[in-house]
Amino acid sequence: MGTAKGPSSGKAGSQGASKRAPKPSKKQSAIDQDAADTENRKLQALIANLQKENVQLKQKQVLSDSTNRRLRADYANEYSQAHNGHQLSDVESEDEEIPSVSLNFSSSIQSRGTLSSPPPRLRKKGTARLMVSSPPSESPLENPIPHIDFRSGFRQPMANRSSIPWPSSLSSDAEDPPHKPGTESSPSSPSSQEHQGSADDESVAELTGTKRPPSPSALEPFSKTKKARVAEVASGAKGLNQRDYKGTVREILNNICKGWEQQIYTINAYPDTVLQREWIQELWEEQCEKVGETYELTMSMKTMIKKRSPHIRGALKAHIKPLVAAMYGFVASASKGTIKQNKSKYVMLAMGGAFTCKDPQAMCRRFENKIIPMIITEYFFGHRKAPGIIWEDDFDPIKPETLALIITLVEHCINEWADGTFKVQELHETTQSARYVNHLKNIKAWCKEDQKVTANICRVWTTKGRTHAEIQPKQAANGYVNDAERVQLRVDLQGRTGETDSEAEDETEGGDKDTGLEQAQEQADAN
């Protein structure tokens, strides 16, 4: 019995062990859970990175589309200037409207905008003279369509084409001229159509006895871009800075950048894209005319000139920043009391533009705060080559555009103290441009209230600046010709031409001779 139970009991034990799976320990469960959490975090981080890359790709696509639009607009502007005001869109729309070439020669010519006409016939010797009649009535075109020369961008006027009679039908007894093989032009070729149109004009001129009108391309003047010389760039340079260019072009760019600075200060501190293009084109043509040469204006040059705007405004802001802290009483400190005082000052100054007033708390004497003449004196008249001295006519008196730029940058420097401590803020052009327009509107309204008084205030600022620079104020020169002297001058000039130096002496000698003759005649009569 004992030997029989041994094997059966061992088999039952092995079956029970196989049915029951071992349970993991708490430590193993924690390890597995941590591994799963780590994997989950990695997946979430990967998803976040993919979403971020997707956003970046969308931003790049938007930037690329904007760049393409800008480049296309620049190209269309240059094309319009080079082709006498014709737009690139007109040529593109005409190209899109051209249908596919038909196998019928006559219909293909009509579809391309050229009226087809039968070839001229030559009459035999002794036959009746050929007569020229109006176009056939079966023609679907009532008026001839002008021929377009796509190479020059010049559209031939309708009047020039319609004023020429068209040969339609000739006498029946005339024979057709022999055609040489291979001389027919293909209707699908634009050049052959242009040659066809010129041949029609010549045949009409022979029949009617009129002169053939000149070609539109011959009448078109040479544009400046065709004559423009390529600027010489230093070896290894990319043409992104003024120092990359040599000779005359470098001088032209230097003068344009100075003119650009003048217009930022006195005309518009934040010009839009259209105005920037106008400024660049005007300044470039002006400087090329001064040097007597026409150079090519490249995109890199335009970009370099446009980048001057933030540099000009940034230089003025760097000068204003320390003055704001000193004049309005902001103190850089980590103490809570000082930070609280700075916040209170900021709220008081920012409320309703109080920082522009001479007394910010009482909100009186708008645009007369003492920081304004201080900035004008120190920055615009601080040295011999300061803007107010180089372009003195544009700063006498101070213009509203200049005052608006100063106030806009003063407000920006005040906002850097908004939370009680100084924190640098970037000069975002969109935000600053809106503030500039708002300040300029208010300044012009201030000037309209009493133009005489406000003009005197601005002129006093100019006088203080010129005094600071040790420049004498302008004085009108006093003349020495009074009213009595003007009467004598009129008598002296009356009856003269002024063409010869001896005119007055001849008149005097002639008067002496006449006087002597009169005296001799009187003496003879007395005898």
Image (tube, rainbow, N blue to C red):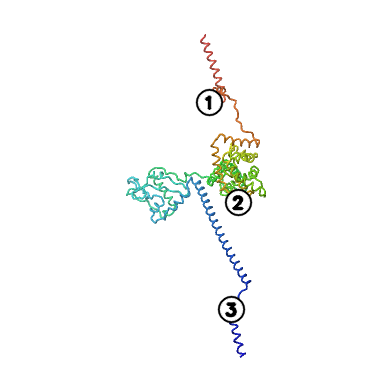
| Closer to the camera in the image, 361 or 333 | 361
* Residue 381, image x, y percentages: 63, 39
N-term mark: 1 or 3: 3
> Which is in the foreground here, disc 2 or disc 3?
3
Which of the labelled discs sits on residue 20, or is there none? 3
The kind of residue tagged 1 is: Thr
Please state, as top left, top right, bottom left or bottom right, where the N terminus lies in the image: bottom right
> Which is in the foreground here, disc 2 or disc 1?
2
User: Does residue 385 sit above or below 418 in this rendering?
Assistant: above
> Residue at label 1?
497
| Closer to the camera in the image, 288 or 482 | 482
Q: CA distance from mark 2 to mark 1?
A: 63 Å
The kind of residue tagged 2 is: Lys
Is residue 507 among what the camera can see?
yes
> Which is in the foreground here, disc 1 or disc 3?
3
* Residue 275, image x, y percentages: 53, 45
Q: Residue at x 59, y 27 (%)?
A: 479
